[in-house]
Image (spheres, coloured by chain):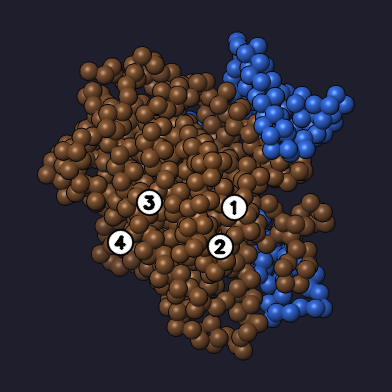
Amino acid sequence: MRETMRELGLAVVLTAFAVFGLFASAAIKVGVAVVDPLGPARYPQLLFALFLALSLVYLIRQIIKFVRERRMPVAEVAADAEVDAEASVSVARPIAVVAALVGYVLVFEIIGYVVATTLLLFVVHIIFGIRKKWWLAAIVSLAAAVLLKLFFGELLLVPLPTGPWLF
Amino acid sequence: MSDVAYALSELIQPFTLLLLVIGAIWGIVSSAIPGMSTAVGLALLLPLTFTLTPIESVVLLAATWSGMEYGGAIPAILINTPGSPASAATTLDGHALFKQGQGGKALGAALVWGLIAQFVSVIVCTILIIPLSRALLQFGPLEIFAVAIFGLTIVTSFGGSGMVKAGLSLLFGLLVATVGFDPFSGTARLTFGSFDLEEGFGIVPVLIGLFAIGELLIQASRRTNTARIDMKKVNLSAKLPSLKELNAMKKTGAIGTAIGIVVGIMPGAGGMAASYAAWNEARRWSKEPEKFGKGSMEGVVASESANNANIPGSIVPMLTFGVPGDAAAAVFMGALLIQGIRPGSELFSQNVDILWTLLFALILANPVILGLGMALIKPAIRLVSLPKAYVQAGILGLVVTGAYAAGNSGFDILIVAGMGVVGWAMLRFGFSAGAATLGLVLGELLESNLRRALTLSDGFGFFFSSPIATTMFALALLTLFAPLLGRLLPHNRRRRAAERATTAEEIIGAQEEAMEGTDRTVGTDAEPKA
C-alpha cells in the first residue's frame, strides 16, 4: 500500500514535470533564421508531449492499483504491509549524501580540494554507519583525498582548487 | 589493410599495453563490488578518458569491459553474490559447485570459456560488421533516423521494466540531450537563463550521476553494512580445465557463445538476458539436465560464455547504426562521443583504426585476463568483505573529482548529484537507466537527422520514400504494438489470468532474492574446499 502511494506520488511528479516542460519548450525563442521546417522548439515539444502521454498512463495505472488495494481484505493488507516494511529502507541516508555533495560544491573552491574532499569522504563514512572506528575513517578519507589529488592534480594535470593553503 | 596494421602498431605501444592491463585489473576487481554493474564500472572511467587519445581510451574501456564479465563470476561462484547482473546465472550452478569443493574448477572453466567465447564472438562480429558498414554508406538522414527509431522501440519492449517505464526513461534521456544551444539555429533551449547549461549537459556528469551515484544512494538506503567473509574459507585458486574437459564442454560452450552473440546484437537485452537464456538452452540440450541448478559445470560454462560473447555482439549495432545493445554499450558509446567519434558511417569512413583497435583489444584483453584472473581472486573477494562505507566513500571521491576534472566546474558536480537522485529513483522504482543513456547518446543523432531529412522533404510522404526507412518504421511499429496485440487475443488473456496468481508470489520471491544477492551477510554458507 505504501509502495503504491510512493509510486502514485512519483507519477504525479512525472506528470507535473511533463506539463512544466511543455510550457518551458513553448517559450523557446524561434529566431528569424530558421533553416529547417521543424525549428528548434518542435522536437522538444514533441518529446514532452510523449512524456506527458506516458506519465498519464503511468498515473492512471497507479490510481487503479491504489483503489484496488484499498478494497483489499484486512488480512491481505497486513501481509502487504510486511512486504512494504521490508522494502522500506532509509531515505535519510541518501538525502544526507546528496546534501553533503551540495555542501561540497559550495565550499570546495574556498577551502581547497584536499580539505573539502577529506571532509566529504569522512561525512560519507559516518552516513554509511561508521561510528566506533571514526578515526580510521578520518585517516582513510585524508589518504584518499591526497591520493586523488596526486592522481588527478599532479599526474593528469587537472587544475584542482587550492584554497588559501595551496593544496 | 593499412588501417589494420596501424591499429595493431598503436595497440602494442607500451603505454597502450599498460592501459590494457590496468583496464583488466580494474574490471576484474571492481566487478566484485556488489551493485557495480558493467555500466557503472565503465562510467567511472569516463573522466580519465579525457586525458587519453581515442585509441587509448578504447583500449582501456574494452579491457575493463572484458575483465568485468569474468570478474563478476568470482563472487558469484565463491560467495553466491553476482558481481554484476550478467553473472547472476553463474550463481545458479557456480556456488553449488563451490560447496561441493569444485569452486576452483568452476572459476577455471568460467575463465577459459569466457575467453574462447569472446574470441569467437569477435571473429563473427568482425565478419558481420564489414558488410554492414558497406551497406551503411547508402544511408541518408532519413534511413539513419528510421534505424534510430527502430532501435529505440526495441529498447522499450526489452527493458525488463515494462514499456511505460522504459519509454519514460528513454524520453528523459532524449530530453536531457536537447538542453543547450540548438545546433541548427543557435537558439538556447531549456537553459532557463543559466550560462552553465548553454553547452548542454555533459555526458560524463550525467552518466556517472545516473549510474554511479544512483547505485551509491541505493547502497546508502540499505541498512546492511558489511558482507563478512571468512578469508580462510575462500582460500582457493582457479584450476584450468584440461583438454579432455574442454572437449566435453564444447557443445555447451557453443550454445552459450551463439546465444551471447545473438542476444548481444539485439538492442536492449544485455548480458544478463544472454546468460540466463544460455543457461536455459544448455539445460534443454544437456544429457544431465537434472544437475542444472545443483552444481552443473555446464551451467557455469553456458552462462559465462554467453556473457563474454555478448560484448562484441552488443558492439555491432552500436558501431554500425549507433544504437547500443545495452547500458554498458551505451556508456561505451558515450566515451566515443566524448572523443568526437560518431558511430555509424562516419566511423567507417574516418575512424576505421578505432574499430580495429577495439576488436583487437577485445581479443588481446583475454590472455591478460587469463594471467591476472587467478591472481586477483583474493583481492576481489577482500574488496567485497570490506565495510561498505570505505568502498562507497572511495567511489564518491573518484566520482566528484572525475566530474570536476571533466568540466573544470563545480556545476558539473551539482549535475552529478541531481542525476544521482534521478538514477536512484530509476533503480528504486524499476525504471531503466540504460534506456535513459540510450536516449542521451542517440538524442542528437535522432534530432539532427530528422530535421535534415525534413529539410530535404516535400511533405509527409517523404518519410516513406525509401524502402529501407519504410521497413524500419514498420518494424518499429510492430515492436511497439505486438505485445499489446498479443495481450488482446482471448487465448493469451486466459493464460495471463492463470499465470497472475503464481507470478505475484514469484516476483516477490525473486525481488527478495535479488536484494539478498547484493547485500547479504555471507560466510555462513561458504564451506571450505574439500
Q: Which residue is mark 1?
A: B54
Q: Are marks 2 and 1 in contact (CB under 8 Å)?
A: yes
Q: Could you tell me residue B37's position as x and y percent? A: 48, 40
Precedes in sequence: disc 2 or disc 4: 2
Residue drawn at (46%, 69%) of the image: B133
Q: Which residue is mark 3?
A: B310
Q: Are marks 4 and 1 in contact (CB under 8 Å)?
A: no
Mark-to-mark CA distance, 4 and 1: 52 Å
Mark 3 secondary-structure assignment: helix
Res A82 visible: no
Q: What's under tag 3, amino acid-wise? A: Asn
Q: Which chain is blue?
A: A
Q: What's under tag 2, amino acid-wise? A: Asn
Residue B351, label in figure: 2
| Crowd around label 3: few <14 · some 14–19 · many ≥20 (10 Å) | many
In this rendering, is residue B146 above or below B120?
below
**Whether marks 2 and 3 lie on the same chain:** yes
Q: Could you tell me residue B527's position as x and y percent? A: 29, 18
Mark-to-mark CA distance, 3 and 1: 23 Å
Q: Which residue is mark 4?
A: B493
